[in-house]
Image (cartoon, rainbow, N blue to C red):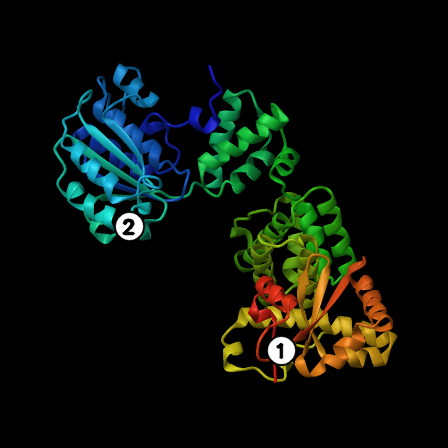
Amino acid sequence: MAYLALYRAWRPRRFDEVVGQEQTVTALRNAVREGRLAHAYLFSGPRGTGKTSIAKIIARAVNCENIDDGEPCNHCSTCADISNGNFMDVIEIDAASNRGIDEIRELREKVRILPAQGKVKVYIIDEVHMLTTEAFNALLKTIEEPPAAVIFILATTELQKIPATIRSRCQSYNFRRLTIEEIGERLQQVAGASEIELNDEAMVLIARRAGGGLRDALSILDQIYSYKGRVINKEDVQEVLGLVDDLFLGKLMDAVFSKDTAAVVGMLNTALNQGKEAQQLAKEAALYLRDLLLYQVLGDKAEFSVVTEASQSFIEQQKQQVDKHKILQALRMMMDTGDRLKYSEGNKFLLEVTFMEMASLFDESEPAVEKKKSVTKKEAASPEKDEKSSARDILWNKILAGVKAQKIPTHALLAQGKLIGSKDDAIYIGFKKGYKFHRDRMGEKPNREILENVLQEIFGREVEVEFILLDSEQYNDIIVKKAIEYFGEDMVEIKD
C-alpha cells in the first residue's frame, strides 16, 4: 500500500476526533442527531483548521447506514465509499479551478437529480471565494431553494470575499486557529502512534511554526521524519525548516542593541555560510523583535513566537535596555527588508546593511530624527518612510565621518552626494544634476580608494561603489532606473 501522508492518515473521521472548534462541532453534531441540518453551510477560517474534514464527516453522517448519536460509524459501505472518494452523491468541487458560470450552471442542472447511492447529496465547494461574480449569481437561487435531499457546504479562507447575498442564505461557522497546546497534544499523539521520538522543544517549535493550522503542523512533522528518521529534536526542526536558534537571535540582537556592527556582520556571515537563507533570517529577527515588544507590553502574559527558555535571559535584559518605540521602528524596518529580500539578488548585502541601519537606531550619540532641516507635509504623514530615511541617513553620516577622518577634500566631494541604497555587493551613491563634477572626481582612483577603505572597515569586506547622476526632471540613467525599480522611488530623494 502506498504511503499516506500524516495529515491524511490522521484526518478526523468523527466529530469527537476534531481538534479544537468545540462550539462548531457540538452544534453540527446535535443538528445531525436531531435531524435539523440546514440546506447550506458556510465554513470560514484559516487553512488547516478542519473545514473540509468536518464537511466530510457531515457527508458521512447524513448517509451512514448505522449512525450512532450523530456520529458516522465509518464501517458501513457508504462511509467507506465516501472516505475513499467513490461515492456518487458526495461531490467535492475546487472553486479555484472551477470558478466560472458554466461550471455552476452544470451544477444547477445536476442538483435536480435525486441521490443515486445514498440518502442525501452533499456538495462541498472548497475555496468558494474564488468564484466569479457571475458564478455566485448563478449559485444564489440554487443555494436559497435547493431540493430537499441536497446539502451545500461552502468552505473559504477569505470570508470577506463572499457576497452578502450568499452569506445570508447559509448557516455560518467561523473556524479559529488552534492553540500551541492543542497542536502540541495532537503532535505527541501522532508521534507516539507512529513510533516517533519527538522531544518537547521540537514539538513546541513545530506547533509555533504551524501558525494555528494542524494540517501544516503534521506536514512539517512528516517532512522532518522523512529526512531525520524517528528521533526528532529541536535542532532537527531548525535544520529542516532553515530556522536559526533563538539563542543565536538573542546574541545577535544583543550586538545590535550594543551597536557592535562588527559582531553583527560576523554573526550574519556565519549563519549565511551555514546555509541559512537571508529572507528567513530577516523573518526570524522580526519575530524575535515582535516577542521582545510584546514582552515589554504584556510581561509574562506574552505568547512568544521564537523565544524559549534558552534565550529568556537575553530578552529579560533587553526588555530594560531598549526603548519600545525604537523596537517598533526596527521591527518595521526588518519586515520591510523581508519583503524586499523576496525579489533581491543581493540578499547578503541588503541584510547586512539593514542590520547596521537597525543598530544605528539604538545609537544615542547619533543626531535625532527631529533635527532634519525640513519636513514636508507628505513626509510628516509617512512615519515609516521617515524611519527608513533616518536610518539610512545615520549610516551615510558614518560613511562621511570615516572619509573625513582620512581626507577632508574627498569628504567635501562626497558630502554633495546621497546614499541611495544597496544591491548585490554594491552601494549606490547619487549626485544631483548640478554636481556632475563631484561625481566624476569621486570616481577617480584616489578618492574612490579612500571611500572603499572606509566601507571595508564598516562592512568587514570589499564593497563596490556605483556613483549615479540624478536628473531632477527625469531618470534617464539606466542605473538610476534599475535603482528605482529595486529600491522604490521613495528611496531616491531629489531636492532642489
The quarter holding residue 325 reads: bottom right
Res. 116 visible in picture: yes
Task: Identify which amino acid the numbered label 2 is placed on.
Answer: Ile
Label annotation for residue 247: none
- Which quarter shows the C terminus? bottom right
Give the left or right position of residue 40, taking residue 401 as reference.
left
Residue 101, image x, y percentages? 24, 44
Residue 58, image x, y percentages? 26, 30
Res. 184 visible in picture: no
The quarter holding residue 31 reads: top left
Distance Cα–Cα, label 1 vs label 2: 48 Å
In contact (CB < 8 Å): disc 1 and disc 2? no
Few, some or many C-alpha atoms within 10 Å of disc 1 (few <14, some 14-19, many ≥20)? Answer: some
Few, some or many C-alpha atoms within 10 Å of disc 2 (few <14, some 14-19, many ≥20)? Answer: some
Label annotation for residue 162: 2
Residue 91, image x, y percentages? 27, 30
Rendered view: 265 above or below 194: below
Give the left or right position of residue 152, taking residue 8 as reference.
left
- Secondary structure of the residue carrying tag 2 is loop
Residue 354, image x, y percentages? 66, 61
Give me the residue at 51% from left, 51% from top.
301
Rendered view: 490 above or below 408: above
Q: Earlier in the sequence, mark 1 or mark 2?
A: 2
| Residue bearing mark 1 | 471
